[in-house]
Image (cartoon, rainbow, N blue to C red):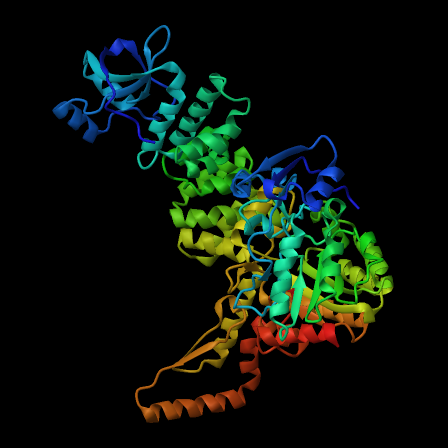
């Protein structure tokens, strides 16, 4: 595990100054960290205006705030592509791992790491939503606006979430990460309602673009531990970067997954080629001048994001599917994150009729 | 924050006024419309200057009026004098008011530099640039300039020829996003190319990123790329500018180009009269749209019959028409 980007500054909203979460974070950070208390978290976020290159500063600053906003919100899909209707359990925003391709660099207006430091209020609001909709199945995750495990050394949030979700028969939780802080999850009574997932890539991308994330082998070792503790697993190949050497690279990663864990333990695998907002490529070029992949061939997709041309994506996905079936057999459910019907048809031979149908496929993959 | 121009002013002899640095003019000559107004009405607004402890007052705003007055051998001008310690703020405020339309990017960059120098010289903050960015500029309503501060700073580091290209409007402001990725030599080469090939602003917006992306991806020099553009232009025999852009596009988007080419070749073979086809944008996802022209029901029926026959007889061709969006041809992808 590469060292976590050191947090230099912690901003604490006065209303959460005495919560167990705040005390824990401050205690673990120890001395030498600048701690500032505030009544106005919005004023703090305004200091980290992304447009002027505050990325690095922001990833070294942590804001602990009271619960506000929505405890659960839909993943921001777009109508032009098929979306799995994943719901975000909004425990934190921002990520210290600093992957070069990260969409959050362009999605949010500031890079500050923010954490809901009043878990009682936050999870209370989430519980209310889950209880009030017993007929709906909630596929929840924490890995969309943040990394689910990256801040665990400071927060111990994941055990709270695992123990929270086990009491809801109409919900499951996916912890999605590039970090490996799983030891505190292993002895929990999780009731099978949490899926431990890792974002995967090929070694070159992991080494050169996922600057502070764990290596592929470390992620696989964490997955193995979670499997042994009875968790089901998931893997997400997103973003796939078909740069020179990608075929051998991705084949190796797929092979290593199935050499490390059993296919039956895998609830789903998702695939998604690199896509980005037009603004993100300039952010990446400025922040990471050595990068090459932003100079690949992209077209403007229906959702106004830059994507590889469709035939290239189809070719890449077919290869990925070939390796997944070769090493993992027919079992693992594979789906695309934000792809169109033509790609589904050309690669999978079937197309979910709409987002709801795709969502149901995944619900059943978990429930069956 | 508006400047209080009703403040008192003094008539100051010209020899007691020194041209300032905060709002420099690249070309301080007085434009004709201003000269005419000055001759007719005199100075309607006092010049703005900063007191100095010894020597002449330092001009903040009014360089062109001062140049006119000197040329016309006027004796004095009305000047509003600001105390030295607040000079940075007012001089910048004038920049705020003046930066909108009649100042070039280079002048804005120099004004910004002057502002930062003022700030630093006054020892206001250890981190003058940071404070200017996060506090002073936004407070003055200069959020856009605050955001562009680094880019304007980069402009001052570019070769003089490139700076002049910005000053003359040859290079648009957006070029500041792309040019820093090139070496100084290549920046000059690009500025010359924009001038020689007489690229419009719209074309320049496309041209610069295309060049950057090609040389980065293919690891070739800009010089080599330009030599190839010349060849491509001649071989295709297109008008110069369009030929250049087409050659660059073809090189930057080879897969897209080949998909389009395949599609057009197949459609040429099908050659169904009175029928037009439009593929989905970028061959991405959506359906192909067909449009048929007919003058009456019989005409339409005939054409539909012909179309059905064609679909039967040329089935393979029709399948190939849709294939470019779907076919992961290994050779093409390499």
Q: Nearer the viewer, residue B303 or B236?
A: B303
Q: Is residue A109 left or right of residue A259?
A: left
Inspect this view and state whether residue A58 appears.
yes
Front in this rendered view, residue B221 or A66: A66
Quarter of the image for residue B239 reads bottom left
Residue drawn 47% across and 31% down? B135
Image quarter (top left, top right, bottom left or bottom right) of the N terminus of chain B: top left
Residue B155 seen in the figure:
no
Above-or-below relation of B211 to A256: above
- Across and down, in percent, residue B76 comes to 20, 13
Position of A36 relative to A164 (above/below): above
Residue A137, above or below A164: below
The C terminus of chain B lies in which quarter of the figure?
Answer: bottom right
Q: Quadrant of residue B66?
A: top left
In the image, farthest residue toward the top:
B54
Q: In this orientation, which residue lies closer to the viewer: B134 or A220?
A: B134
Q: Measuring from the top left, give residue A242's x and y in whole percent.
A: 68, 58
Where on the picture, by quarter, is residue A262?
bottom right
Could you say which is closer to the camera, residue A198 or residue B207?
A: A198
Residue, x 49% and y 20% (percent of image)?
B124
């Amino acid at each position: 595990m590469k060292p976590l980007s050191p947090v230099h500054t912690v901003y604490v909203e006065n209303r959460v100054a005495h919560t167990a979460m705040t005390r824990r974070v401050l205690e673990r950070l120890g001395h030498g960290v600048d701690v500032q208390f505030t009544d106005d978290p919005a004023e703090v976020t305004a200091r980290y205006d992304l447009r002027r290159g505050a990325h690095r500063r922001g990833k070294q600053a942590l804001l602990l705030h009271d619960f506000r906003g929505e405890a659960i919100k839909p993943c921001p899909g777009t109508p032009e592509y098929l979306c799995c209707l994943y719901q975000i359990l909004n425990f934190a925003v921002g990520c210290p791992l600093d992957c070069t391709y990260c969409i959050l660099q362009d999605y949010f207006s500031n890079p500050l790491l923010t954490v809901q430091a009043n878990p009682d209020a936050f999870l209370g609001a989430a519980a209310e939503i889950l209880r009030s909709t017993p007929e709906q199945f909630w596929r929840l995750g924490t890995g969309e606006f943040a990394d689910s495990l990256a801040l665990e050394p400071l927060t111990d949030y994941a055990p709270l979430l695992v123990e929270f979700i086990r009491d809801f028969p109409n919900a499951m939780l996916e912890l999605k990460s590039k970090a490996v802080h799983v030891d505190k999850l292993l002895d929990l009574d999780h009731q099978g309602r949490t899926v431990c997932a890792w974002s995967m890539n090929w070694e070159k991308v992991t080494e050169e673009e996922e600057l502070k994330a764990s290596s592929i082998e470390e992620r696989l070792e964490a997955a193995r531990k979670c499997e042994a503790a009875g968790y089901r697993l998931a893997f997400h190949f997103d973003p796939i970067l078909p740069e020179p050497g990608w075929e051998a690279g991705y084949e190796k990663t797929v092979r290593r997954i199935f050499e490390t864990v059993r296919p039956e333990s895998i609830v789903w695998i998702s695939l998604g080629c690199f896509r980005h907002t037009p603004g993100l490529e300039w952010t990446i070029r400025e922040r990471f001048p050595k990068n090459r992949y932003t100079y690949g061939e992209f077209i403007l997709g229906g959702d106004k994001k830059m994507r590889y041309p469709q035939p290239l994506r189809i070719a890449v996905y077919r290869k990925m599917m070939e390796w997944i079936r070769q090493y993992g057999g027919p079992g693992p459910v594979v789906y695309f994150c934000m792809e169109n019907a033509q790609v589904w048809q050309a690669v999978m031979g079937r197309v979910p009729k709409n987002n709801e149908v795709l969502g149901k496929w995944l619900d059943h993959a978990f429930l069956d | 924050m508006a400047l209080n121009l009703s403040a008192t002013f003094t008539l100051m002899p010209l020899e007691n006024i020194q041209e300032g640095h905060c709002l420099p003019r690249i070309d301080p000559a007085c434009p004709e419309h201003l000269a005419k107004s000055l001759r007719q009405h005199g100075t309607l607004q006092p010049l703005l200057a900063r007191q100095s402890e010894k020597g002449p007052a330092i001009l903040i705003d009014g360089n062109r009026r001062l140049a006119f007055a000197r040329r016309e051998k006027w004796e004095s001008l009305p000047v509003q004098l600001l105390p030295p310690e607040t000079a940075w703020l007012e001089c910048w405020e004038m920049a705020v008011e003046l930066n909108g339309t009649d100042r070039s990017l280079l002048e804005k960059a120099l004004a910004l530099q002057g502002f930062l120098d003022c700030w630093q010289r006054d020892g206001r903050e250890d981190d003058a640039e940071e404070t200017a960015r996060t506090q002073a500029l936004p407070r003055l309503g200069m959020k856009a300039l605050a955001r562009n501060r680094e880019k304007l700073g980069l402009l001052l580091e570019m070769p003089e020829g490139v700076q002049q290209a910005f000053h003359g409007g040859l290079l648009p402001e957006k070029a500041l996003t792309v040019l820093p990725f090139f070496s100084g030599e290549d920046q000059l080469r690009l500025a010359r190319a924009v001038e020689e090939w007489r690229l419009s602003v719209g074309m320049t917006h496309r041209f610069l990123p295309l060049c950057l992306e090609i040389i980065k991806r293919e690891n070739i020099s800009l010089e080599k790329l330009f030599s190839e553009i010349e060849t491509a232009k001649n071989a295709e025999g297109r008008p110069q500018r369009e030929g250049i852009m087409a050659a660059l596009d073809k090189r930057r988007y080879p897969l897209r180009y080949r998909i389009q080419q395949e599609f057009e070749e197949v459609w040429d073979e099908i050659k169904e009269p009175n029928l037009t086809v439009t593929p989905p944008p970028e061959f991405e996802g959506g359906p192909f749209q067909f449009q048929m022209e007919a003058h009456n029901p019989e005409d339409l029926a005939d054409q539909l019959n012909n179309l059905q026959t064609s679909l039967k007889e040329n089935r393979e061709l029709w399948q190939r028409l849709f294939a470019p969006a779907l076919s992961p041809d290994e050779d093409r992808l390499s």
